[in-house]
Amino acid sequence: MEHDIQRTLLEMGERARSAARVLAAQPTATKNNALEAIAQALEDARAAISAANEEDLAQGRENGLDEALLDRLALTPARLEQMIEGVRQIATLPDPVGEIRELRYRPSGIQVGKMRVPLGVVGIIYESRPNVTVDAAALCLKSGNAAILRGGSEALRSNLAIGEAIERGLREAGLPGEAVQIIKTADRAAVGVLLTMDRHVDVIIPRGGRGLIERVSAEARMPVIKHLDGICHVYIDDRADEAKAIAIADNAKTHRYGVCNAMETLLVAEGVAERVLPPLAAIYRDKGVELRGCPRALAILGDAAVPADEADWDSEYLAPILAIRVVDGLDQAIEHINRHGSGHTDAIVTQDYGRARRFLAEVDSSSVMVNASTRFADGFEYGLGAEIGISTDKFHARGPVGLEGLTSEKWIVLGDGHIRQ
Amino acid sequence: MEHDIQRTLLEMGERARSAARVLAAQPTATKNNALEAIAQALEDARAAISAANEEDLAQGRENGLDEALLDRLALTPARLEQMIEGVRQIATLPDPVGEIRELRYRPSGIQVGKMRVPLGVVGIIYESRPNVTVDAAALCLKSGNAAILRGGSEALRSNLAIGEAIERGLREAGLPGEAVQIIKTADRAAVGVLLTMDRHVDVIIPRGGRGLIERVSAEARMPVIKHLDGICHVYIDDRADEAKAIAIADNAKTHRYGVCNAMETLLVAEGVAERVLPPLAAIYRDKGVELRGCPRALAILGDAAVPADEADWDSEYLAPILAIRVVDGLDQAIEHINRHGSGHTDAIVTQDYGRARRFLAEVDSSSVMVNASTRFADGFEYGLGAEIGISTDKFHARGPVGLEGLTSEKWIVLGDGHIRQ
């Protein structure tokens, strides 16, 4: 059985590698036509996809999945519509492949520059949301990559129905159907095998809970684009515009609680703490946010907060809880963030030009912001058009990863018979 | 003992991490001043470095090192001079850190762009050449990274003498001496420990023979910038300018034999093979290059070549040997290169615009060239100013790696009180 899975996956890998070579050489129009054909095929397959999804949901209820998971699994007509619309939006994005930059003459007479190229084969391992199947397939196709997709076993029927429509769309557009392959077995051993296939898969993107991401990071023999914690900070400087500071600290915490770009720790400069913390505490109290403060914060907040302990500074609550620390000023804020943060997204609120400039340079996170809510850290808000994930690593892609993160650059050299002396 | 090495290396890692934070925030002028101070300290330490190098050489002779290795190990006055000059050249290069690109307004009103930042701590493992110590230190410093350096044990005394001068230079410029640390033990276990330190080291760059690189790739828990084979091709198209084709095929093979960007396989279109192969064979014969041909090549070359077998297409000779294959045309050439090449450097010689355009797009190598010798694949020729290595991987850095390859990009967001709706 294990052996069968290995053979099946290696065959998928070979087919993906061949398909990737074909995809890499496709002109933009062909890829866009294929995206439109996929959107059309998904529309035509709505009934079949919904029926498969109903089966997944029934099975899920039988297996006692919790309501949150069932909700993520469900493909309502509106979600299906959104999914199809997403494919058409990706078709409208600029093609990153083939872009040449910095093509310059060198003293030898050759011209040297860089050309953007696909990575090759992208493996994506995700949990229950079936819309990721469509999203990931479309992003990989647009960026000239073949994809091997492994969704959650709860969503297998939905994913297979979606995969069939994608394959039909690819073939109608004259592209290899193997450009997007869905792993058809629910056996968990398949993930283990996939992670060893560094000759067939150029990068792995895990999307899901911490357990999945840690497993993939530990086992993968190829590079991984991954996202771990989102311990995001807002630092309110004593030269902040106080109204803006309050609006940003409110929005960053309370706009949505369960998201990776929500603020988890608020840092406030001592000089402004007495003015901004009381009105903020009133807002948070009305919205039911629990406050945990350092001694200096407690001295201002009184009963409105409970004491924070050391673990609070390293916690990603993903909940209506906020840690608050009063700091001496910018230096201590930067030091706190670089020590306790997760390198995700951190913001300063200040009207001071020099401090904004320092914060931007010295905070070592994938997104660093001035006078804006951390909630903006998102592929759509950044104009990527779509997002295949968020990376908290430094290597290759950092922060929200769109089409460019699925590509690499090669050098090109143009000469006219030039030889090296 | 093993335990001691682990403790020593973890302490180095901690110091490197702190130093990296300091370096990341340094203005360009401070880094350049430090490079000048290092150059001066190296000049002042010439006698000590030469004496240490003499000891290494004496020990090497005693241990029976071969002449080639002893030559790589030797720091002649001219090489020392070159090494010091290299540091001053790196000071003149533009600082990549802090460069902001594509800062654009988004519909929400925020401005979003990318800022170039150091990777953090760079680990470099190399073999006997002591000049790598200076080179690597200077490149890491300029790009705002701390460095942990592990040279070959044959060069330990030379490296330590160089390391002392570097540390003195750093401190004179007001920077932490721990920004560049040399592993002081010759114990091989140190490399194994270093490769597990993914919390302290952000990227590992191995420079040396295949054995070293394979070991590092297999064991490293952090990303690796590495260079494996250089199986480089020149394809002479039937629309090539024949004189240019001959000059390029000569230069790519015979300019230097033992280098990774030398041509190992020559592909010639059938339509032009009878005209270019005989004069090329005469050149190669005069220079003592052994030719190994496919049947069609042998039919033209006769006794001037021996038959190639399948293994020849996958061989990196690093020697005066050349495999020659006659192909039908462009499609077969691209197919051969993508199948047998190592993704290093490949060139087409053609006057045909459309074929040049296709070759550039479809050959999947770190450097792809039109009408130029593969020997140009080099950081200096490309204008990087210096080169810390060549990457044959696709992820992050590809081809010659200079200062930019030692950096990453973070997102920056500038707002004026913006919150997400």
Image (tube, coloured by chain):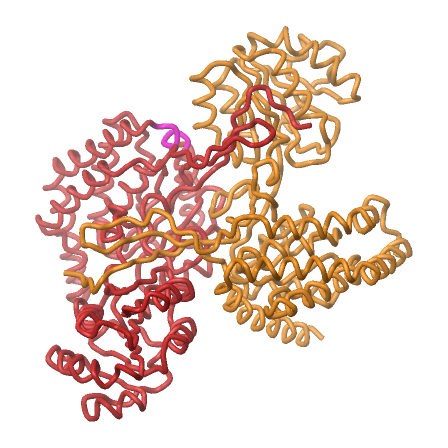
Chain colours: A orange, B red
As drawn, B296 above or below B140 = below
Horizontal and vertical percent position of residue B145: 36, 38
Residue A250 vertical position relative to residue A103 in the rendered view, above or below: above
Q: Residue B59's quadrant in the figure?
A: bottom left
Residue in the image at 28% along x and 81% along y = B324
In the image, what residue occupies the spot 21% across and 69% down? B248
The image shows residue A65, relative to residue B230, as above or below, that is: above
Q: Is residue A90 visible?
A: yes
Classified by dominant secondary structure, the portion drawn in magenta counts as helix
Residue B231 coordinates in the image, percent (x, y): 33, 70
Residue B189 visible = no
Residue A303 vs residue A145: left or right?
right
Query: Is residue A310 shown left or right of residue B267?
Result: right
Where residue A27 appears, as percent x and y from the top left, is 50, 61
Residue B22 lies in the magenta-colored region: yes
At 29% from the left and 83% from the top, the residue drawn is B271
| Image height of A256 relative to B391, above or below | above
Which residue is nearer to you in this view: A235 or A23?
A: A23
Residue range of the region highlighted in magenta in the rendering: B21-26
